[in-house]
Amino acid sequence: MKIAIDINVVLDVFLERKPYFQHSKMLIAECLKGSHRPMLSSLAFATIYYLARKFKNRDFAVKLTDDLLLIFEVCEVSMKHIKEAHLANWNDFEDAIQYFSAADANASMLVTRNTKDFEEQEIPVLTPKQALKIIRHK
């Protein structure tokens, strides 16, 4: 099962942001144990690096990027996804880009802490807690 992971879930784990840390960490651990394929959009890598450097330091951001490249498949962002996101006119443009690239990559779900920001529902948009329940029963 391909599972697209939103930027906020990854940052919750690696920056140990409470109260979100626990479910996000369990989700990523569960993905690594089973036949699940966690994916991050190519856009997410730049954003995560920038935020990790801002809130920690450059060495942390470099190490985090190295770790992410080992854990996650890259869900490419193309001109098509940017145009779809633009035409969708969501409140959060970055979330729309991630959503359309995940849908195009045939993700089974997109996991985010901010489900309300995702307006389309071609693929399920779930919280880490909701996603855990599903993948533990497959």
Image (cartoon, helix red, strand yellow):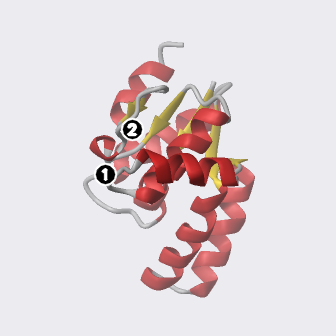
Q: Label 2 to label 1, Cα distance in Å?
A: 9 Å
User: Crowding at label 1, few (<14), some or many (≥20) Cα neighbours within 10 Å?
Assistant: some
Q: Amino acid at mark 2?
A: Pro
**Circle 2: is it few (<14), some (14-19), or many (20+) Cα within 10 Å?**
many
Q: In the image, residue 85 lies at what x, y percent?
A: 50, 50
Q: Is residue 128 visible?
A: yes
Which residue is nearer to you in this view: 34 or 11?
Answer: 11
Residue drawn at (47%, 48%) of the image: 87
Q: Position of residue 37 (x, y in %)?
A: 67, 34
- What residue appears at the point 47 percent right and 58 percent down from the top-left corner? 94
* Foreground residue among 43 and 132: 43
Which residue is at a point 68% across and 61% down the rendered structure image? 67
Q: Secondary structure at mark 1?
A: loop
- Does 49 appear above or below 93? below
Residue 38 sits in which quadrant? top right
Is residue 72 among the parts visible in the rendering?
no
Image height of 48 relative to 108, above or below: below
Does 1 sit left or right of 129 as displayed? right
Mark 2–mark 1 CB contact (< 8 Å): yes
Q: Earlier in the sequence, mark 2 or mark 1?
A: 1
Name which quarter of the figure residue 50 lies in.
Answer: bottom right
Q: Which mark is residue 77?
A: none
Quadrant in which the C terminus appears = top right
Q: Disc 2 designates what residue? A: 128
